[in-house]
Amino acid sequence: MTPSLTGRLIVLACVALPAIAHAAKLGALVSGHDGKPLANAVVIAVPEDGQLPPLTKVVEVVDQIDKEFVPYVKPIRAGSYVQFPNKDNIRHHVYSFSPAKKFELPLYSGTPSQPVLFDKPGVVKLGCNIHDWMLGYIYVAETPYFGKSAGDGRVQLENLPPGRYRVRVWHPRMQGSEDATVQRVVLQEAAPARVEWKLRLNPEYRPRRAPLPGEPGYR
Amino acid sequence: MNRHSLCWLCCGLTLLSTSAYGDWGLDASAGVTYDDNISNSLDADDRKADTAAVIDVSGGVHEQLSGSTGLGLSLLASSDTFAQYTGLSDIGLGARLQMRTKFGLGAQAPWLAVAAQAMYRNFHYDYLDGWRYEAGITAGKQFGERWALRATVRYDATVTTQTPPPLIPTLPGSPYDVYGWNLGVQGTYWLTGADLLSLALNRRTGTVTTVSPPDDEVAEYADRAALNTVFGGPEVAYRIFATTLTTTLTWSHSLGERAAINLLYAYSRSRAPNDLGDYYANVINLSLSYAFY
């Protein structure tokens, strides 16, 4: 017997409405030690009760455009897949040595036939074996509650179940470990919580740059 | 290698350009160079100093043959315009072929490059006109995020297209035809995210041209000599054998992703055999380089 439309709506409402009704918000502001807002910081909220929604198959995308990884930082949930389409009209050779995911996509153009599974939480540093300046990061989070800061340094996490959370931040150039950034917050549906970090940054030594005098050749 | 070789290189460039995945690039730099011994003179009284405006352009195509090996072919153009000794001003046109391979994966994998280059330089002083050839092998490696080292073995040769009348019957030929072997090492250090410091040491063994008033002592050790009027007076250009040590310090500051301002200082000291003496030169260059794409 096929359930009626009304029945389906009732079931859907029973499943979805409690989550929406009890959704909490978390706002974060990430800046450098100089006070300037910091882009590409990942804010991660982990519920202390360990309750996480079930994982669904997700395929995220990290492009290669104008010999750069786009986006530079891509946060995903552990268990997600990532596709690496090459949108340049040259070939790239993507790899990672990171313990969270070692992989290699040998010299290719277009889109690889299979996405790559990232099933272990951690930071995955991406490189291209042809263009050494190409650098990108995939942050594999153990929770679905995460966000990446834009140019204003702000991250807004929404639809979190109320409760106690351990909230931390990560940035590709941050000094120290992300564990040292953990803040404990209690999220309530009526009162959005706010967290803030000021991070000390390491300089980046592999920028794309003009050639040195007398050094012709491919960079 | 001659003009025909350059034609072949141009043909190769055309062929590479038809590749589906050829990556085109164009780099240019413009700057000012000061050399306090442009005449390569042995004696302090004979030294000539001058300043030149220098422009270099390199454009070509790179084809990645595999995940580790790439082939690049570039056309080169250069211009030197001297303020005082205009005979040394020249324009050059040439080509460069390079194959580079990495031994492993990642930015820190060691690499090896084999390169050959030919450039025709047309000087205001016609007896200097000729081809400049270079061929060599360079090995390099990056260490961590901030250090990179490379070592080069390179042969260079200059072959002029006009031979001045012999000044001394026993020393025929052009004194401007020189050749030499170069052995060099270079270390690069990222001072900051935007600043690079590079120290290079080069040892060249071969022939050099030195200009001075007629000198019996130099003539004794020279194998070629000709009258030289580049510096105004009736002087003599000699070709002698010498070992030249050059230390080059370069600071480069990035101005965004495509541009950089560069300051270079080089000190060269050449030693001729048989206690003929040393000559030295200080060169300072300030340039702005830009990678168009």
Image (tube, rainbow, N blue to C red):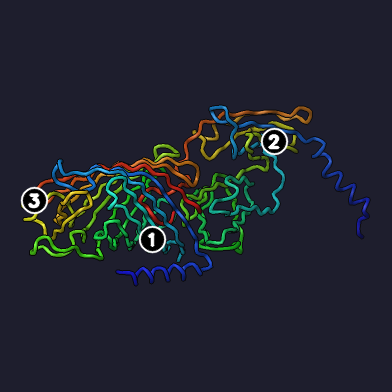
Q: Which x, y percent locates residue B262?
A: 39, 42
SS assignment at label 2: strand
Q: Residues within 10 Å of mark 1 (few under 14, many from 20)?
A: many
CA gap, disc 2 and disc 1: 47 Å
Chain containing mark 2? A
Disc 3 marks a residue whose amino acid type is Asp
In-front residue for pair A148/A23: A148
The residue that label 2 is drawn on is: A156
Residue sitting at x 23%, y 52%: B230
The residue that label 1 is drawn on is: B100
The residue that label 3 is drawn on is: B215
> Residue B189: in sight, yes or no?
no
Q: Earlier in the sequence, mark 3 or mark 1?
A: 1
Disc 1 marks a residue whose amino acid type is Arg
> Residue A119: in sight, yes or no?
yes
Q: Which x, y percent locates residue B144?
A: 39, 44
